[in-house]
Amino acid sequence: MAKLFAKDKFNLILVSRGEDKLRTTASLLEAEGIEVITISKDLFEINGAGEVDQEITARGLQVDVLVNDAGQGMYGKFIKNELSRELDISQCSSCTGIIRCCLS
């Protein structure tokens, strides 16, 4: 998805917990002549999305399009899965702080 946005000349903010992969991906996308900002955060952590929101706001950036590709999952029947893990996944999926970035 990021490649398509880069080809359409959208500047990008990439967020991932893997900083090395972020740098590599940013270099490839910058070859399209766009600006790529990287933020290394784990969105699965309870404060991760809020910290991304704070960093974006502090840098004075504006988010026009949000593509949330953060994901965690469990397999099996919901009723048999560990409740605390399902709640953690729900927290990550909502990414409230990231959504607030788009509204700022």
Image (spheres, rainbow, N blue to C red):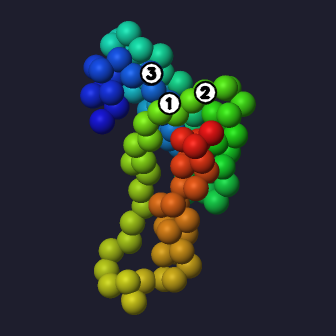
CB atoms of marks 1 and 2 within 8 Å: yes
Image disc number at residue 61? 2
Q: CA distance from mark 1 to mark 2?
A: 9 Å
Question: Are there few (<14), some (14-19), or many (20+) residues within 10 Å of tag 2?
Answer: some
What mark, if any, has residue 11 been given in the picture? 3
* Mark 1: secondary structure: strand
The Cα atoms of the two marked residues, 2 and 3, are separated by: 11 Å
Q: Hey, which quadrant is residue 60 in on the image?
A: top right
User: Reading the chain from its start, which is encountered first: label 2 or label 3?
Assistant: 3
Residue annotated with mark 1: 13
Residue at 41% across, 56% down: 71
The amino acid pointed to by label 1 is: Ile
Mark 3: few/some/many CA within 10 Å (<14, 14-19, 20+): some
Q: Position of residue 29 (x, y in %)?
A: 37, 20
Whichever of labels 1 and 2 marks the residue nearer the N terminus, that label is 1
User: What distance separates the C-alpha of mark 1 from that of mark 3?
Assistant: 7 Å
Q: Residue at x 55, y 65 (%)?
A: 91
* 10 left or right of 40 in image: left
Residue contact between numbered discs 1 and 3, judged by CB atoms under 8 Å: yes
Q: Position of residue 66 (x, y in %)?
A: 44, 41
At a point 54% along the width and 74% down the height, the residue shown is 87
